[in-house]
Amino acid sequence: MSEFKNVTIVKQANVYFDGKVNSRTILFADGGKKTLGFMQPGEYTFNTADPELMEILAGELEVQLPGCAWQTVKGGESFNVPGNSAFTMKVKVASDYCCSFIK
Amino acid sequence: MSEFKNVTIVKQANVYFDGKVNSRTILFADGGKKTLGFMQPGEYTFNTADPELMEILAGELEVQLPGCAWQTVKGGESFNVPGNSAFTMKVKVASDYCCSFIK
């Protein structure tokens, strides 16, 4: 799906790591929530509340999920992050992502 | 207005200057178009087709509009750019913006 229709987008960006990671919150009619975000090269650790599906739309990174080895993820690929956990990404090239919060 | 309701958002980011500027395209039911974007510190020149209203949601930059002196623009302020022209921005701190394309 290349676009999301009939959604609400929060105007102000979510900003992390001095702006090196930023995202927009998308709210769906069914109560669902996603963020569309962009990451500059660098290393970032995020905590999760709900489980998340991270789709890398473009770019390349390495990710370390809880209790796992580092794995490379490229544009078109995705990974799941358990809820109430943390994950670290080493972003190799500027990367575009879509994060879905799984209820 | 802190959010846009009943809109379509294009999933893939618009990426400029090696990702130092990135934005998402928002399409409105009335045919209107805006982008919500984020800029890393740096200097950027953009060309326009339609006239644009640039709202700086957060951050600080200097902008040189066609035939004008440099002016400082901070979060909460905005500037208009004529169509079929170019403008240059010196982004001082990571800045969040909303660009409206004026038909």
Image (cartoon, coloured by chain):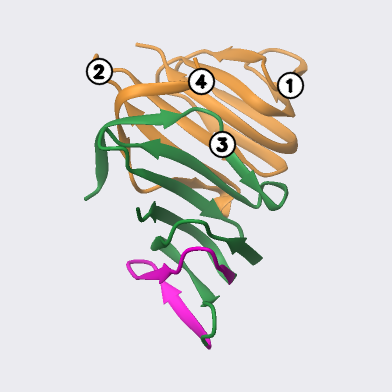
Chain colours: A green, B orange
Task: Say which residue label 2 marks.
Answer: B31
Report how far apart the C-alphas of labels 4 and 1 lie in the structure. 18 Å
Q: On the rendered structure, is B60 left or right of A30?
A: right
First to last magenta residue range: A69-88
Quick check: marks 4 and 1 in contact, CB under 8 Å?
Answer: no
Q: Is residue A4 magenta?
A: no
- Amino acid residing under circle 1: Lys
Report how far apart the C-alphas of labels 2 and 1 lie in the structure. 29 Å
Task: Say which residue label 3 marks.
Answer: A13
Mark nearer the viewer, 3 or 1: 3
Report how far apart the C-alphas of labels 2 and 3 lie in the structure. 23 Å
Chain designation of label 1: B
Report how far apart the C-alphas of labels 2 and 4 lie in the structure. 20 Å
Q: Is residue A57 above or below residue B47?
A: below
Q: Residue at x 67, y 28 (%)?
A: B58
Label 1 Cα neighbours within 10 Å, binned few <14 / some 14-19 / many ≥20 = some
Q: Which mark is residue B2?
A: 4
Q: Which mark is residue B74?
A: 1
- Amino acid residing under circle 4: Ser
